[in-house]
Amino acid sequence: MRIRRLPTALVVLAAAVSLVACGGQREPEGGAAGTDGGRLTIATGNTTGVYYQLGGALASVISSKVEGYRATASETGASVQNVQGLVAGNYDIAFSLGDTASDAVNGVNSFKAKQDVVALTRLYPNYTQVAVRASAGISKIADLKGKRVSTGSPNSGTEVIARRLLEAAGLDPARDVTAQRLGLPESVDAMKSGSIDALVWSGGIPTGGITDLMTSLGKDVELIPITDLLQPLQTRYGTIYAQGNIASAAYKQPADVATIIVPNVLLVRKNMPDELAEKLTKVIFDNKDALVQVNVAAKDITLDNAAKTDPVPLHPGSQKALDGLK
């Protein structure tokens, strides 16, 4: 287990949390925990992404604050893989992008049947971050034609939105770009070596891997705006996609960058006992400061938005917890 390329101010704290909470891939005995205690495994994402950092922090909070439970966080390829593993019983809790979770409950795109998953809470928004080599002549997604592009880990939420962006720009992901399905650490390394021209990443702000990339390459790399594709995405997939801005301060860039955001949700199986779902939801909001210390993206986890998980149903136990917190 390792933490790589975190922002300097967070290295010590994030590493400490993850050493306690991250136990590697889970043995296949998911779903064993009941209301009286047990072991819980959290499906997160790439090691330099926000899911991984916050998943480790959440595992630590659960282990220390929910009596009788021990939680561990697992590195994964992220959203699609997380939902698949959750349904299969390999994980008990899973981070997911809202668009992937919507596909899961509707049984479309990456999912051939409706999945019995529900949400504990809505989390923070993910920002679509498209980083390009400044010398590659790329100012919009359509300019990726003929370029070498990392579209994210296989079966990740990043891969889902990367393909949708390319299609919205009139490009065929299989023919018009040389797509490389790389995780974020590998994508950053490939950008540094010059073996790819661009990468797509969907994550919270700031993401450690993107901070590393922007710091290392300086003016040789830039983030491009993509909101010209918001309308076609909304027309096809709905208002799960919205406009946002990557603030200049996030990566010490000269100006804000207009982008597309999508909410994150924390998922569990539908059959999780109500009492356990209530405890888990409550512990998130009672210990939000601990999550914020690991990554400031957690500031955007709010009670006002917690129940806004549509079309993913909110777990009844979570609803009870949220009602009691308000």
Image (tube, rainbow, N blue to C red):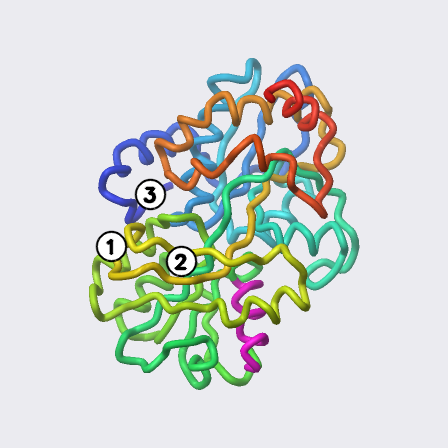
- Look at the numbered disc 2 and give the secondary structure of its residue: helix
Q: Which residue lies furthest to the right in this view?
A: 113
Amino acid, disc 3 = Ile
**Badge 1: few (under 14), some or many (20 or more) residues near its Cα, within 10 Å?**
few
Q: Where is residue 195, by image quadrant?
A: bottom left
> What segment carries the magenta color?
159-171
Q: Which of marks 1 and 3 is nearer the N terminus?
A: 3
Q: Mark 1 points at which residue?
A: 252
- Look at the numbered disc 1 and give the secondary structure of its residue: loop
Q: Position of residue 126 (x, y in %)?
A: 49, 51
Kindly identify which numbered label has been placed on residue 184: 2
Amino acid, disc 2 = Leu
At 76% from the left and 60% from the top, the residue drawn is: 112
Q: Which of marks 1 and 3 is in front?
A: 1
Taking the image as shown, residue 17 lies to the left or right of residue 175, namely left
Q: Where is residue 306, by image quadrant?
A: top right
At 72% from the left and 48% from the top, the residue drawn is: 311
Rendered-image quadrant of the C terminus = top right
Q: Where is residue 180 in the image (x, y as percent from the top left)?
A: 45, 71
**Badge 3: few (under 14), some or many (20 or more) residues near its Cα, within 10 Å?**
some
Q: Are marks 2 and 1 in contact (CB under 8 Å)?
A: no
Q: Name the residue under label 3.
A: 3
Of residues 162 and 27, the one nearer the viewer is 162
**Looking at the image, is 169 positioned above or below residue 3?**
below
